[in-house]
Amino acid sequence: MLPANPLHSLLSGDYPRSRVLAATLFIILVCLAFAPFLFPGSQPINVAAKICVFVILVASYDLLLGYTGIVSFAHTMFYGIGGYGVAIAMYNFSPTWSAMGIGVVAALILSMALALVIGLFSLRVRAIFFAMITLAVASAFAILASQLNEITGGEDGRSYRIPEMLRPGFRLFDEPVLGVMINGRILTYYLIFFSALILFLLALRVVNSPFGRVLQAIRENDFRAEALGYRVLVYRSIANCLSAGMATLAGVLMAIWLRYTGPDTTLSFAIMIDILLMVVIGGMGTLYGAVLGATIFILAQNYLQVLMGELSDALAAAGIPLLPALFHADRWLLWLGILFVLSVYFFPVGIVGKLRQLRS
Amino acid sequence: MTVATATAADNATLPKVKIDWLPAMLVPILALAALPLVGSFSTWVTLTVAALAMGMMIFLMASGLTLVFGLMDVLNFGHGVFISFGAYVSLIALGPLAGWVASDNIGLNILVLLACIAVAMLVTGGLGWAFERIVIRPVYGQHLKQILITMGGMIVAEQMIHVIWGASPIPLRLPEGLRGAIVIGDAAMERYRVIAVVLGLLVFGAMHVMLNRTKIGLLIRAGVENAEMVEALGYRIRRLFVGVFIAGSALAGLGGVLWAFYRQTLTAGMGMEVNVLIFIVIIIGGLGSVGGCFVGALLVALVANYTGFLVPKLALGSSIMLMVLILLWRPQGLYPVAKR
């Protein structure tokens, strides 16, 4: 019997396989784990929480796109269902843990059932068909959420209170720890961080299981996988449901963090595009890509804009035409879009894939 | 069901292709069925004309996409870009022609509209050529990459619109003479919608003649059915495809201009917003079929307008419901294209 290696079982045998990558991941992990102590202030911890949530969201999308080879545009829908599950439960009942639990379970059931129906309806045909159907369903859902005023709060969304322990006013200790007061906000952050960590390790477990191998076989050649006796439709549907469930949980975490759920923060198509960018830039078909993609993208979203704004001002001051407009702070998506197109062409394996190639 | 069951010729002439009328008949059937539900005849006329106008615009925007897909198995998720660009480019024509826009001479007004359309079609056609060249050509036959890359192209192009024309929505003024409504009896029909219907019918007619009565049209239809065979007969399907892509982009630009005047505001995301509707339409019509696309567009628009009037809450989900119903009836769409 092999000696039990805790790291091996934690990562399900899927090591980063590149020193640079391992180091980067380690730095990200440490930064996220000690974010409240390393970077005081509300903006950095906000960014850190967002990164945690998006790592899960992107990893769950990668399960579909990178591992199973199907393109879905309904991922924000499941994310939104999670958010609205918490929002509706908290708003209509009481801000207690049990209400939250009910909301989460209801959201999970709803999104997995929806994923199953959409999958059975359209996955049997072709990848492209699934992409179009999910796009249509997701946009209909977004509209529905903003129409059903009484339930979802419409365009304004819902603000709600969360359990006592997670509110900023709550103090765990009377004295500050390491110079930081442990309040409800930081507890919420750690709730999100550890949930994200556990979910990520679970996702690693899934993709490295025999089930995950079948998914990859389907991605490479679905016809051959079918010929080998794997029922492609069943596997694809299960992957779709799993990924939907994970996205729902990501939505739940985001809803707890923001204490607000609205169409713009959960269901908008812009978020779907963000997810796509993160997956592709980070690297499809490897969950570590989700970590890198989400981290880089969200850092860029929060800090690149400032840099670009300064650059734009400098260029404008120098009197150069057109360039200031190209580098305007709101145009950061343009550059990420170009990066996205280039990465689909020239390194479809993403940053993680490149780092791994460097090694070999 | 369709072509295969064509009956044998009675005489020396070629056997006539049996036309599948049933899906096409859905349009009048639906319109008539809605009449008692709506109640008042004049309201019904207004709604129907509005729906037809909307359907024509959707058809114009969707026709290129369905042909491109049918011919080369390329699904362009960035198709909405051409719509947005077409709409924005019409500003170029509107600038120098501002006098004509303000004049109440309807001839000049229509000329303005045509000028906008001409400029938009030229520019989006060129853009389509570049898009095919740069974005799509390297990823033939790889669906996953196509979806991703056209999505990426869309993001970049949308941002470029922001760079060129600014990020805030631009109001668009409908030429003076095209405003208002024509009133016949109790029924009011907006003038612009009538014009949109006429333009849409003209383009559909032209496309129909092109596809069914010319050699190029024959080749395109043959290419949709079986591209390899057309190549084996010595025609360069690639060139044909580039041509269709350019034409499809130009049509999207035309649709974009009409759509923009209809909404009377320009936003960079407008193309992407209709894109969803366009996908529904081409799925309903059967991927690759122009006639199906036409019927599908009209059906979607009619259903959307009627439900919008009868049960406003359901209006926005109505197209999805329609799609589900149609796919339950004909899983490959109204007019399935062979071998798809």
Image (cartoon, coloured by chain):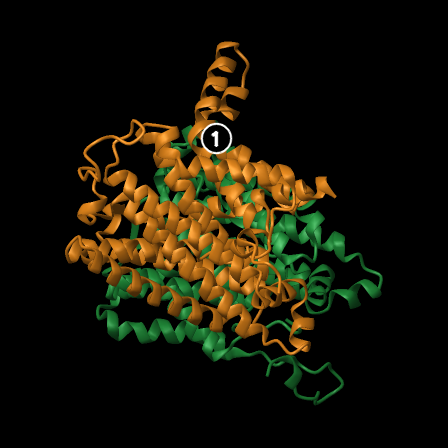
Chain colours: A orange, B green
**Quarter of the figure with residue A258:** top left
Q: For the residue labelled by badge 1, is the local secondary structure a helix, a strand or a loop?
A: helix
Location of residue A91 in the rendering, given as x and y in whole percent from the top left corner: 18, 53
Given residues B79 and B46, the one toward you in this image is B79
**Quarter of the figure with residue A187:** top left
Image quarter of the N terminus of chain B: bottom right
Residue drawn at 70 percent across, 83 percent down? B15
**Quarter of the figure with residue A85:** bottom left
Badge 1 local density, few (<14 within 10 Å), some, or many (20+)? many
Q: Is residue A262 above or below residue A328?
A: below
Given residues A34 and B187, the one toward you in this image is A34
Location of residue A264 in the rendering, given as x and y in whole percent from the top left corner: 33, 45
Given residues A100 and A58, the one toward you in this image is A100
Residue drawn at 52 percent across, 15 percent down? A315
Image quarter of the C terminus of chain B: bottom right
- Left-right relation of A310 to B288: left
Residue drawn at 43 percent across, 43 percent down? B269
Instruction: Give, as a three-letter code, the residue at label 1.
Output: Arg
- Left-right relation of A90 to A179: left
Location of residue A42 in the rendering, given as x and y in whole percent from the top left corner: 31, 31
- Left-right relation of A198 to A231: left
Q: Is residue B93 above or below residue A92?
A: above
Q: Is residue A308 visible?
A: yes
Location of residue A115 in the rendering, given as x and y in whole percent from the top left corner: 43, 66
How many discs mark residues in the rendered view? 1
- Left-right relation of B4 to B231: left
**Can you identify the residue that label 1 sits on?**
A331
